[in-house]
Image (cartoon, rainbow, N blue to C red):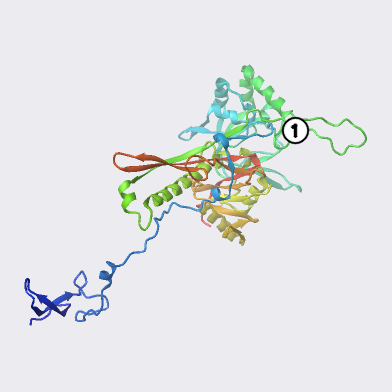
Amino acid sequence: MSDSPANSTSRVGFMSSPGCTSVHFGVFYVSVTDPTGSPSAGETADQQQLSLGRAAARNLATTTKSAPQMQEISSRWLLRMLAWEEATGGTYRVNRRLTYDVGDGRVTFSNVGTDISVIPQELTELPLLRGFDDTDVLTALAERYEQREYEPGDVIVEFGNRSDQSFLIAHGKVNKLGPGQYGDQTVLDVLANGDHFGDETLADPEDIWEFTVKAVTPCTLLVLSQQAFDEVLDQSEALREQLARFQAAKGKSQNEHAEAAIDLSAGHDGEPDITGTFVDYQTQPREYELSVAQTVLRVHSRVADLYNQPMDQVEQQLRLTIEALRERQEHEMINNKEFGLLHNSDMRQRINTRTGPPTPDDLDELLTLVWKDPGFFLAHPRTIGAFGRECNKRGLYPDSVDVCGHKVPAWRGVPIFPCNKIPISDTQTSSILLMRTGKEKQGVIGLHQTGIPDEYQPGLSVRFMGISEKAIISYLVSAYYSVAVLTPDALATLEYAEIGRES
């Protein structure tokens, strides 16, 4: 008998010749080498394997599989924390008390190299020119704005001086300062790109500055003098009429929120005539139409028929598709230019950071804007990290709160939820949202419509579209949604929070 091959074990077997009944004894060999021909792990070249190898055993084993994973899936706290209301008919109308819209928006500029000019139509964002549509006059005013540069610490206007100029902030950040209770200066406001001040004083040349404005960063401002404004005013009857309308609107009775006042009597004695009143409404209230996110899911019938164990292929395809739709839904509810929260925050509810990165002082300032039962902050995870670094520098350690079994960081007891849909600019700045939620609290609400055909989840339908000639099954997956801000003070935004600065 010859020697056995290397790494093989001899076995005695039975062999029979075809057509014969006699049985012969023989020897055959069973190879126990690894597929590479090398000894199994832990064995030397001259050791023999005594049991079935791992590689061979795996051929008989059933693997345990996970469901398909998807890195895009996030916590989607906004969708979870909003109160959702029915939008029957696909539209939700928000009725409010009548407000006097005096124009408090931001101004947009254009530039050629370092030369910056204001877009004429953007001047209608100024209170003085709100609703004015004479293009020639707006162009004449825009051409008379002069560009000026300021360095950090420069005083732009000073308290007590004559206010005979209108300022537009094209780039940079300034502090609006006023006298405090004991004579020291107090920061009244922080103004940045697109903000403006002084334009209302052009209507009254005898006004004086009631505050000081000082540059915090290098700034580029466009300035319109009283003399330049008067030149256009003398030549335009339409502008004189606009000025008269503006002054008349300022005299109308209104509360601190610019709502038409409701006359009341209080604290009276005897039998005086009680004041009569009524509550006036907006004649053209805002309407929110449901938006839609859709896709067509395609699955080949062969895949759906043959490869459904241990997981249903159509179900898994549908699950991941819905997750992607919900992620897009949250993105739109924050960033959509028509109804997204970043674009629908009232201008009076937008503030800038005092120093650059988001600080506890900045979040306290947000809380003063949404002080009626604030619900939660929403910020990019990196912005939350930047806020944490600022707290560490001050020796502050914010508490956490329990929300649905999750430990969430909080400030002043208001939870701070992460949301990766809030964008980060190329200059490493981002925003923080603070909102009050719920219809009963006149807050921010989500909008959807339930009971739609082929509904799979509330406000989401999966509709069978048929099988093509190539045996591909198609499903139309649709999500209907929107978001509404019932009153302006339900939402506030901290803008231009720097998150890339070293601590």
| Nearest the eye: 141 or 249 | 249
Q: In this view of the protein, can residue 219 be seen by the observer?
A: no
Q: Nearer the viewer, residue 425 or 480?
A: 480
Amino acid type, callout 1: Ala
Mark 1 is surrounded, within 10 Å at the Cα level, by few (under 14), some (14 to 19) or many (20 or more) other residues, namely some
Where residue 104 appears, as percent x and y from the top left, is: 62, 34
Pick the front one: 440 or 456: 456
Residue 171: percent from left, percent from top: 54, 39
| Residue farthest front in this picture | 21
Residue at the right extreme? 270
Residue 5: horizontal and vertical position, in percent? 13, 77
Going by the image, does 19 lie left or right of 219? left
- The picture quadrant where one finds residue 51 is bottom left
Residue 458, above or below 308: above
Q: Quadrant of residue 399?
A: bottom right
Is 9 left, or right, of 166 in this rendering?
left
Name the residue rendered at 29%, 41% in the picture. 470
Q: Which residue is mark 1?
A: 261
Q: How many marks?
A: 1
Name the element at disc 1: loop
Q: Is residue 479 placed above or below 251 in the rendered structure?
A: below
Residue 195 or residue 328, whichever sits in front: 328
Check the picture and name the quadrant holding the N terminus. bottom left
Give coordinates of residue 351: x percent, y percent: 61, 44
- What residue is at 72 percent from the left and 48 percent from the top? 184
Q: Is residue 438 visible?
A: yes
